[in-house]
Image (cartoon, coloured by chain):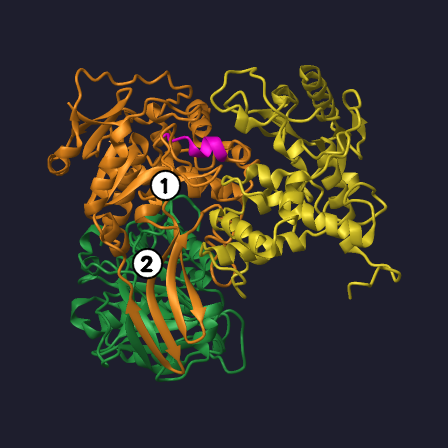
Amino acid sequence: MTAEEIKKVNSLVPIKGKIIKINQETSDTKTYTITDENGKKPFTPMPGQLGMLSIPNVGEAMFSITNQGENSIDMAIKSVGTLTNALFDVEEGQECGIRGPYGNGFPLEKCKGRDILFIAGGIGLAPVRSLIMHCIKNRADYGKLTVIYGARSYSDLVFKEDILENWAKVDNMDVFVTIDRGEECWKQHVGFVPSYVEELNLPPTLTFVCGPPIMIKFTLQSLMKMGYNEDEVITTMEMRMKCGIGKCGRCNIGSCFVCLDGPVFTMREMNALPQEY
Amino acid sequence: MKGITKEKLNQLLQALSGDYQVFVPAKTSDTVTKFQPYGEGVQMFWQENTLLSPKDIFFPQTEKMYKFKTKGMSVDIATITPPDAPKILFGIRSCDVQSIDCMDKVFLTRGYEDEFYKTRRENTLLFALACSTHADTCFCTSMGIDPQQASLADVQMSDVGDAFALEAKTPAGEEVLKKFDANLVELSNPKIVPLDEILIHVDMEGVSEKLEGMFEHPLWDEVSSKCIGCSTCTYLCPTCYCFDIDSKLHGEDGTKIRCWDCCMFSEYSRMAGGHNPRPSKKERVRNRFMDKLLYNKKRHGQVFCVGCGRCVAKCPVNLEIATIIQKVKEAAI
Amino acid sequence: MSDISQKMRDVAKKLLQDGTVSLVIGWEKGNLWYKSAPAFISLPEDADRLVFDDFCYHNLSKYLIDRRDMDGKITIFVKGCDSRSLIGMIQDKQIAREKLYIIGIPCPGMKEDKAAVGKKPGADLPEAKKCALCVNPNPLIYDELIGEKAPDREKKNDEILEKVEAMSQDEKYEFWQEQFSTCIRCYACRNVCPVCTCRECCFDSSAPQWLGKAENPSENSFYHLTRALHMAGRCVGCGECERVCPMGLPVMLLNRKLTKEVESLFNESPAGTVMEDMAAMNHYRLDDPEEFM
């Protein structure tokens, strides 16, 4: 989806929202369920789109929307800076500012009827999860779903219920989870995500990758080695954002704004951009 | 040809001020010239282009976006509507007129319209002034601009000695000249003061295309060495548009503001957690010039430099875009 | 002065060729006759770019900060005022003395480039504003000196400062509010200053955010007054801050006032004039004056 295809006009002013539910995923990550002030969905995002969440007297930042319900959207947020640290301390019922949806979202048309591989690391599972949940909700429209997910340790795994219980129960869906270093409680695979990907050696298919920059870099290298197609390996990028509408100039990689022309890019598109991210 | 004698200029401006907020180039201190609303005590300045570009009329350096109140867990938000009075930019030069076209492309196209810019920009008439003098640092002609004919002008003004000739270029321009016809005079045989030869010439032919392959070129190490990382060029540049969003707090109340920012600042693209995709001056200098000469051309079809020469005049270390264009043109690939 | 330019080129060429230094920082011509710019030369054949003329204002010592860990030694050309900031930097341990091969150039005074606008090359120009109160035309630290020693300069009265000092409290407030409301917070003054060497400037900090980006007289005042206080007693009077200000703010006025205060309170040598004497605010003695406490 290009910027031109996004018809909705959004201003820089948020609407009033409310955080109705907070779920602690790991020691530093929580999932926030957000509605507008009337308990309805603030907007309807496509999988892969982003939203600007603000506590007005603290700050505003862009987060990927990890799932949506009938009346709410979910954001999984890791505590790393001023706003996210403040968010970490809020309680259910906290009002906020919310605006969106922004970004081009995942190319759903491309996914129809296909077998899809999702590779994610750490908090990188959050943006990809919106697509996984969409595929699960519309199961018949998509082929075999495979998830390869890893994190530094057991306690760093996010969406544990999904990756360890729920998704394995979904029809024609495989989930492979790994952690970087072995632990007492962990009986599954141990190792980094890129090497696990090579180990599993799945046949090339439509693939979505997201995680820390270094993990994306090595995973993409592995996939290229395994003969994956540049147009069929898709990633979602992250940069510092302020306006979210491609005006303030900050989030550019070359001539693309991550908030407007991205955050979803194919590998071919990534390779054409200056390597500055 | 209709016009206004320089003697009677004030009368015309006063008359126009009845219906419009008229911005004129003015001297506000010994060292500063900028566009100001016409009124009593405003010292108009025609000798050369203003130091501060007129971009702050539509895109103020600090702009209030909305008010908010945070108390306990509750949040309240109230939009602030920017002023939308009809305006005339009187005496704006071709380079700055072209820059308004660039800013329009940034703020009003590609999926979203920036409501703050749009409100200020609507109902604005451009009375462009043909340059009869130029600064040492001007190079608009190299950027495809005619200093005596502004592309987007509603009315083209030209210095004909003791008067300004006024030629309507658009229906809106025609309408306003008709409305204020009583203040105008018929000029017999007006001769436009010709412009002296411009000193700085650069060859833009193929520069944007060449830059595509120059991301890793050693040129950037060389040119970025002397940059001191201030925002003089950016804040004076009429086509630079980067902004930041910040809050001003007063206890429970606050205002969200948008303000000019500069990609040359070290923390401009620094992310929460510390990662910075442009950690050193080299990356930031490269990004700024690539953005002006290539990226914006890809996004909007035009190079974002109008040859106004403000950066040439004011950069503390004479690192300015005319020389960069030359260096790119001459660089060995 | 063209004689000096040739000497600069010869010595730079030699130092680079025999490997004594790996970088030479000097000046070269800009794109207008009244503009010169800092030059970074690392190849002997590029040394011919170096010049010393009426427009070599730039205090090059600031550029050493980013290069203190680079391989090899650095040659830097300094005028009188520049050499003072170099002494200050070495005292502050911002750069190691052993890293530098300093070439001093006695300075005849620069010319005012703002007066050259619109004039033809070679036009008669007044002395640069920043040179008006100079008392150190000769470099105070160098490994080698190029050119004849400049004649001593008489200490002049700081008339501009005296004029502001004579204002009433209200007049002073009005004066400064008018100046600060013109500031566009480009930070050119801070970035060019050789004394402002903090790795992360307090004004760049986002957590906590001491100063936002909003431009208004209040925040502008906070910036200028804080910076002046951070530099109190350490300013070497090179005047670069005022020269680079695009809006023509009298930035040096604040610095000169504080320099005067510090000098009268502590009676120590001016900043950066004697290597063994740290700037007054950078050290303490048990017998320091206390009357103001």
The amino acid marked with disc number 2 is Gly
Taking the magenta stretch, the answer to whether it contains residue B309 is yes
| Residue that numbered label 2 is attached to | A244
Task: Please say if B219 is above or below C97.
Answer: above
Magenta stretch: give its range. B307-314
| Residue that numbered label 1 is attached to | B42
Where on the picture, by quarter, is residue A50?
Answer: bottom left
Q: Tell me whether circle 2 and circle 1 mark residues in contact (CB < 8 Å).
A: no
Q: Report the residue at 21% width, 74% height from top.
A: A137
Q: Chain of mark 1?
A: B
The amino acid marked with disc number 1 is Val
Q: How many residues crowd mark 2 within 10 Å: few (<14), some (14–19), many (20+)?
A: many
Report the chain shown in yellow.
C
The quarter of the picture where the C terminus of chain C appears is bottom right
Report the chain shown in green.
A
Taking the magenta stretch, the answer to whether it contains residue C194 is no
- Which one is nearer the viewer's eye here, C218 or B299? C218
What x and y, as percent, mark residue B205? 33, 24
Mark 2 and mark 1: span between their CA atoms?
39 Å
Where on the picture, by quarter, is residue B298?
Answer: top left
Dot 2: element? loop
| Residue B237 in sight from this viewpoint | no
Asked if residue B209 lies left or right of residue C289, the reply is: left
